[in-house]
Image: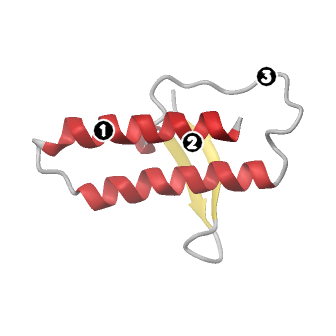
Amino acid sequence: MLQLAEEMLEKQKLATLISLRSRGHEMATIKAQYDGLINVARGKAAAGHFDNVPYSLYHIDLSPRNVLAKEHAAPDDRRLTGIID
């Protein structure tokens, strides 16, 4: 499950970077947002949230603008708080 989440986020990150390249958006910020989402997925996997789960969330547009996360004690400690559809 983690591998699937990582692959989907990497694919969406690449598509977003390609589509925004010509618009002059800040590429480092977009990369950091997607990398943060990947780290959240890794944290969820390490905590066992993907183990033995018969159902999973699938969102066709899982990009940073559709994910709500809260920063906790440290900048690298983000917690998923919601998904916008």
Which residue is found at the position 45% from the left and 41% from the top? 10
Residue 21: image x %, image y %?
A: 16, 44
Structural distance between the alpha carbons of marks 1 and 2: 15 Å
Residue 11, image x, y percentages: 42, 35
Res 7 visible: yes
5 to the left or right of 12: right
Q: Earlier in the sequence, mark 2 or mark 3?
A: 2
Q: Amino acid at mark 3?
A: Tyr
Q: Quadrant of residue 47?
A: bottom right
The amino acid type of the residue labelled 2 equals Glu
Query: Can you tell which mark lies on residue 6?
Result: 2
Q: Identify residue for label 3.
A: 55
Badge 2 marks a residue whose secondary structure is: helix
Whichever of labels 3 and 1 marks the residue nearer the N terminus, that label is: 1
Up/down of 63 relative to 70, above or below: above
- Which residue is denoted by mark 1 in the rendering? 16
Q: Residue at the spot x=34%, y=40% of the render? A: 14
Q: Residues within 10 Å of mark 3 (few under 14, many from 20)?
A: few
At label 1, the amino acid type is Thr
